[in-house]
């Protein structure tokens, strides 16, 4: 693949700030990115990392004036095994450089991560020259931070990289990815050999980053925030209709709510209540089966999903919304679908001691715990499923603030009734938490307060709407009550025209796949 310095799709622009002794390069690669993966079916996570490596290679290769070859190798310890790039310098002035890239990863891995490993740069200046190699550990799972660390250790040069990798919404051109960013280096003064001070350095980094990202903001017809069932459904529908879209997910995996369910949990679906209007499937099955199926469908349906993209703010109006993403990324959209659910805002015990280390509000794997005395607070489906699963190898008691189990699935009602009747676990009815002390929970019961010794407390009390964020978007709620939900039309449109709310935040169970009517969707 060739890298053309004068091609708009693939370009490099050098710059220098003389009075600050700074130098750098802007780079954008688009056709090169497409050519790199033309004959491969890499998952999006692998593509993103590979393009980060390519962009780093271009920026570094152009900066240090390679006479022959620069190689970059990233060796991971987990699911990402190897990322490798080679930059071959132009043979003549003004001619294109040549670049190649390679990726090796665990094809069976459900989630692809690069948390640890080694980052290596090799500079080979040709015949009769000894190649130079510098190696640094992967820093914070970030290739750009690893490259910064390399320059600081090997060259004692302050270096900053800002990389932006995005997937284009259009399939027609065949160029689906854009990698853009810049490299900035602080050089010592020729006379006193001093570097720019840290304060000025940080200010300049922020200014250049802000200006660069403003000029490279992404534009879509629909931006969907949250990749739960409803968000996935909306994105799949947009993909079906060939509508430009982006699905923004805070974490590194789809559907964080279901991802956080206890392992092997059987998830039930009731699609008969609301018709499915996209190809995203949701049949009853285990947590693992559903997540694996959705990962496959995200790839098959060409859903434009962006992981690790936490939306921190939404402003603007219909036809001209702006979404601010953590890290400085900016996205423009004509319409927004908010599918953030409520699991990120879990209800706490709200009593003295509810923040002790042995109090938790989430349960991943019940089999982690053995021979403990565990109190489960709550009487919903999650609490019941947690309690019964834990009771297999622990002493478990359930705290129910009512005298019966209401509003739970029929299967769970049978499950908890049989568990209590058989003596598998104990239940405190009409009881609430008064306070928590080390090694005990104090309950308010009809007979007065009682202390229950325990090793662990698991509170499953549901969740509340993330009201502060939702209201910051301009969306009105039905009342001031903590349990209130946003005001919505029959089409799920909020009080902000063009901004729709779906899923649990719209009072629709997560087991329903929903999609608002937007434009021709």
Image: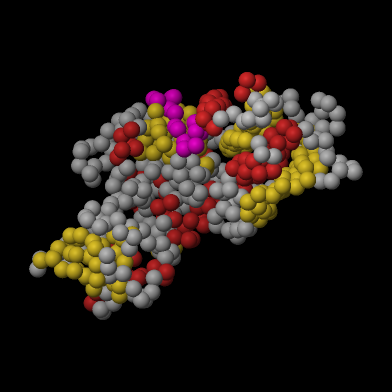
Q: Quadrant of the N terminus?
A: top right
| Residue drawn where x is 24% and y is 71% of the image | 453
Residue 314 position within the rendered picture, expressed as x and y whole percent measured from the top left: 40, 31
Q: Which residues are magenta?
A: 316-330
Residue 248 position within the rendered picture, expressed as x and y whole percent measured from the top left: 47, 40
| Residue drawn where x is 23% and y is 73% of the image | 426
Residue 325 on the magenta span: yes
Is residue 413 or residue 29 the one in the foreground? Answer: 29
Residue 171 position within the rendered picture, expressed as x and y whole percent measured from the top left: 61, 36
Furthest residue to the top? 19
Is residue 246 or residue 206 the one in the foreground? Answer: 206
| Residue drawn where x is 33% and y is 33% of the image | 472
Up-down relation of residue 454 to residue 501 (above or below): below
Q: Please state if 381 lies on the left or on the right of 153 as rendered.
A: left
Helix, strand or loop: magenta stretch: strand
Is residue 409 or residue 305 the one in the foreground? Answer: 305
Residue 416 visible to an observer of this rendering: no
């Amino acid at each position: 693949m060739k890298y053309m310095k004068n091609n708009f799709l693939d370009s490099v622009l050098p710059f220098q700030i003389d009075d600050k002794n700074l130098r750098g390069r802007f780079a954008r690669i688009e056709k090169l990115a497409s050519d790199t993966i033309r004959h491969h079916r890499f998952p999006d996570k692998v593509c993103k990392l590979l393009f980060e490596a390519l962009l780093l290679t271009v920026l570094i290769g152009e900066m240090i004036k390679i006479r022959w070859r620069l190689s970059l190798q990233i060796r991971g310890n987990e699911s990402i095994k190897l990322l490798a790039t080679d930059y071959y310098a132009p043979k003549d002035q003004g001619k294109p450089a040549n670049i190649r890239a390679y990726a090796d990863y665990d094809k069976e891995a459900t989630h692809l991560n690069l948390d640890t490993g080694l980052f290596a740069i090799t500079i080979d200046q040709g015949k009769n020259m000894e190649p130079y190699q510098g190696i640094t550990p992967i820093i914070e799972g970030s290739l750009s931070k690893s490259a910064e660390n390399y320059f600081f250790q090997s060259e004692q040069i302050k270096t900053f990289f800002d990389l932006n990798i995005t997937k284009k919404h259009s399939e027609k051109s065949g160029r689906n990815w854009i990698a853009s960013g810049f490299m900035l280096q602080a050089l010592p003064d020729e006379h006193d050999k001093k570097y720019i001070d840290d304060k000025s350095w940080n200010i300049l980094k922020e200014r250049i980053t802000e200006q660069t990202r403003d000029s490279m903001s992404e534009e879509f017809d629909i931006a969907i925030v949250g990749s739960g069932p409803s968000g996935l459904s909306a994105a799949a529908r947009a993909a079906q209709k060939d509508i430009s879209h982006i699905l923004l997910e805070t974490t590194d995996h789809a559907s964080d709510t279901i991802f956080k369910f206890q392992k092997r949990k059987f998830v039930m679906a009731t699609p008969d209540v609301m018709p499915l209007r996209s190809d995203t499937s949701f049949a009853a099955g285990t947590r693992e089966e559903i997540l694996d199926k959705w990962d496959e469908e995200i790839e098959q349906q060409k859903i434009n999903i962006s992981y690790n993209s936490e939306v921190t703010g939404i402003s603007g109006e219909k036809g001209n919304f702006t979404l601010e993403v953590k890290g400085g990324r900016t996205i423009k959209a004509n319409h927004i679908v908010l599918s953030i659910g409520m699991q990120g805002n879990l209800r706490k015990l709200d009593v003295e001691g509810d923040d002790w280390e042995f109090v938790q509000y989430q349960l991943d794997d019940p089999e982690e715990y053995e021979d403990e005395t565990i109190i489960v607070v709550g009487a919903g489906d999650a609490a019941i499923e947690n309690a019964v699963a834990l009771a297999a190898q622990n002493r478990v008691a359930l705290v129910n603030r009512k005298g019966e189990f209401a509003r739970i699935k029929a299967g769970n009602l049978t499950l908890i009734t049989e568990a209590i009747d058989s003596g598998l676990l104990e239940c405190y009815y009409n009881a609430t938490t008064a306070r928590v002390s080390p090694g005990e929970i104090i309950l308010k019961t009809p007979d007065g307060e009682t202390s229950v010794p325990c090793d662990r407390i698991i509170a499953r009390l549901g969740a509340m709407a993330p009201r502060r964020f939702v209201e910051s978007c301009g969306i009105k709620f039905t009342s001031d009550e903590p349990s209130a939900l946003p005001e919505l039309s029959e089409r799920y449109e909020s009080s902000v025209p063009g901004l729709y709310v779906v899923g649990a935040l719209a009072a629709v169970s997560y087991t329903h796949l929903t999609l608002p009517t937007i434009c021709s969707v």
